[in-house]
Amino acid sequence: MNLHEYQGKSILQSYGVAIQNGIVAENSKDAVKAAKKLTELTKTKWYVVKAQIHAGGRGKGGGVKLAKSLDEVKNISESIIGMKLITPQTPPEGKKVNKVLITEDVYYPGNSKPKEFYISILLNRSSGKNMVMYSTEGGMDIEKVAEETPHLIFYEEIDSALGLLPFQARKVAFNLGLMGNSFKSMTKFITNLYKAYVGSDASLFEINPVLKTSDDRIIAVDSKVSLDDNSLFRHPDYKVLRDLEEENPTEVEAGEAGLNYVDLDGNVGCMVNGAGLAMATMDLIKQSGGSPANFLDVGGTADAERVEFAFRLILKDPKVQAILVNIFGGIVRCDRVAQGIIDAYKNMGDAINVPIIVRLQGTNAKQAKLLIQESNLDVIAATAFEEAAKKVQEVLLE
């Protein structure tokens, strides 16, 4: 589950991580009130207005702007709230901004020059260990750093049984070139950040930038936080932070029905039982000249009601030109699945306006194929993987 910046910062702060103070607002009037409140709390006279959407690169799309007065806070907030923000990480049409975060200015002058860093904590899947990934080159162009100067990115793996050890925190601060008070602040920052990562059951913490201020404080200026969905039963206070407006409505609808669905950009809808088979089916579609329009795992029960719901989800995508149903009958019998497909087809009537290729393999596969052939419906039956691929290719060429 992805969180907004202000939600992620709230979790960080609860674990003692220093953050850039901010107040969220849903309209320009509340934005001005938030700015006034920040001045009372922090004495700041400049403010940063930041669009709150589930995507990075907001600054590049015009979603992060500096306001040097309350009038500018009002005008900038009005221009950002309600806009379709397009960034390198949004869909082509962008994402609507429903709220902004008004934050204090932390780039104030002082004894030393402010410096931006990049720090993230995530799972290294190759080793099965959590790791801290960090760089001296924080800011908006971190992607370029990874491509052009990968030697400037450091990694520190953490033994989950021991946690982040003090020498590792010091190593991070040393590699970032810090000294004196900023060195001490960074070791504390990293230690608390890792505690927050583990304590919140997160799958990703990305802080870009982490800022060394002119008075040697270390603070999180931004936060990208993703929580493990499977752990939310342990965090009812985090579960309520989910913002459904930021998610694909079809994926939300599928999740509520217990289906694993991911929207893609292709032209062939998929309905499969099992995630592994779903991935193989997507490869099959690509090899046949098509492109998968979705990832859809219906699970072990494929009765008429569930199949009908899955068909309706797939057909919401106007780009779909064909549907491939690929079921391996182990626990579930193929003839039962076939009957579910036939019943769903009859219930939906004219709502199904694209060819359907059904490949059933496993328990009672022959009976299933016979059921489909005798139904006199516009459903194409297949048994082998290659046969299904050929049928997909044929309907796409028609």
Image: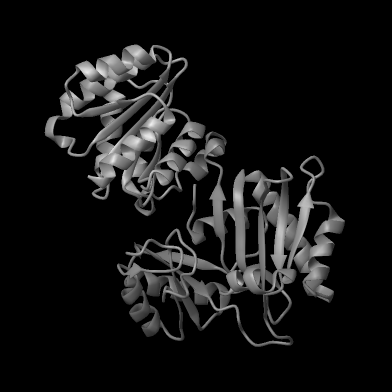
Quarter of the image where one finds residue 27? bottom left
Residue at image x 69%, y 73%?
149
Left or right placement of residue 147 versus residue 327 in this view: right
Furthest toward the right, the residue is: 167
Counting from the top left corner in percent of width and height, residue 40 is at 52, 75
Residue at 49%, 69% in the rendered image: 57
The reply, left or right, for residue 56 in relation to residue 211 is: left
Depth check: 209 or 75 in front? 209
Q: How is the image coloured?
A: one colour
> Is residue 253 in sight in this rendering?
no
Q: Residue 83: percent from the left, percent from the top?
A: 31, 69
Residue at point 69%, 87% (across, down): 110
Identify which residue is drawn at 65% across, 74% down: 148
Residue 293 point in image, percent of width and height:
35, 46
Looking at the picture, does residue 339 appear above or below residue 384?
above
Q: Is residue 266 above or below residue 331?
A: below
